[in-house]
Image: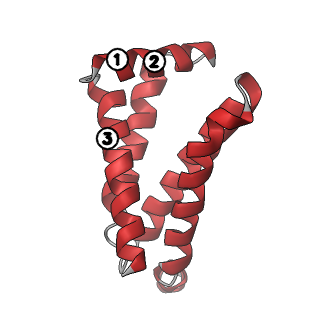
Amino acid sequence: MTLSIITGVLSAFFLFASSIKIFGWQDTIFRVQLEMFESYRLNRTIMRLVGIFELFGAVSIWFSDAFWGPLGALALMATSVGAIGCHLIFDTWKQGVPAMITLTLSSSVLWATKQPLPTIAWQAT
């Protein structure tokens, strides 16, 4: 039950965030995010790639019984770590708090769904 709630919150957050990064449909948020990316010396293409990575994670974390679930959690963890790093280098740690929360939540999803990873790796060898 708790895992479903965490997965739902993460998925909703990253679906929203990724859709803005990919399509730029919400002009106000898009402009703020693009300005942040540019202040980190990253361009629109990188922003779109981050959005695609987030979209992959937001969708795949729902497949917790398969290889895709843990892989999606890892994708969300990677984007969260990247965001934390950029905020620590270019901003203040306070701006990284949302990424710290998503890192914690995606880590808990990975921990709860870690079972398929060793199974798949064992079968591959």
Kindly identify the residue that appears in the image at 30 percent across and 57 percent down.
59
Question: How much space separates mark 2 and mark 3, taking CA atoms?
Answer: 15 Å
Q: Secondary structure at mark 1?
A: helix
| Residue designated by label 1 | 28
**SS state under label 3:** helix
Q: Is residue 21 visible?
A: yes
Which residue sits furthest right? 89
Position of residue 56 measured from the top left corner of the image (x, y, whole percent): 36, 50
Q: Considering only vertical position in the picture, is 66 above or below 103?
A: below
Residue 8 location (% of width, % of height): 33, 63
Q: How far is mark 2 from mark 1, CA to CA? A: 6 Å
Q: Is residue 110 left or right of residue 29?
A: right
Q: Quadrant of residue 64?
A: bottom left
Amino acid at dot 3: Phe
Q: Residue 16's mark?
A: 3
For the residue pair 5 and 118, the one nearer the viewer reads as: 5
Looking at the picture, tell me which residue is in the foreground, 93 or 43.
Answer: 93
The tag earlier along the polypeptide, 2 or 3, is 3
In terms of sequence position, does the residue under pointer 1 or pointer 3 come before the other? 3
Q: Is residue 67 above or below residue 73?
A: below
Residue type, mark 1 in image: Thr
**SS at circle 2:** helix
Residue 49 drawn at (x, y percent): 42, 32
Q: Are marks 2 and 3 in contact (CB under 8 Å)?
A: no
Given residues 103 and 125, the one toward you in this image is: 103
Mark 3 Cα shell of 10 Å, populated few (<14), some (14-19), many (≥20)? some
Q: What residue do we see at 37% from left, 58% from top?
A: 9
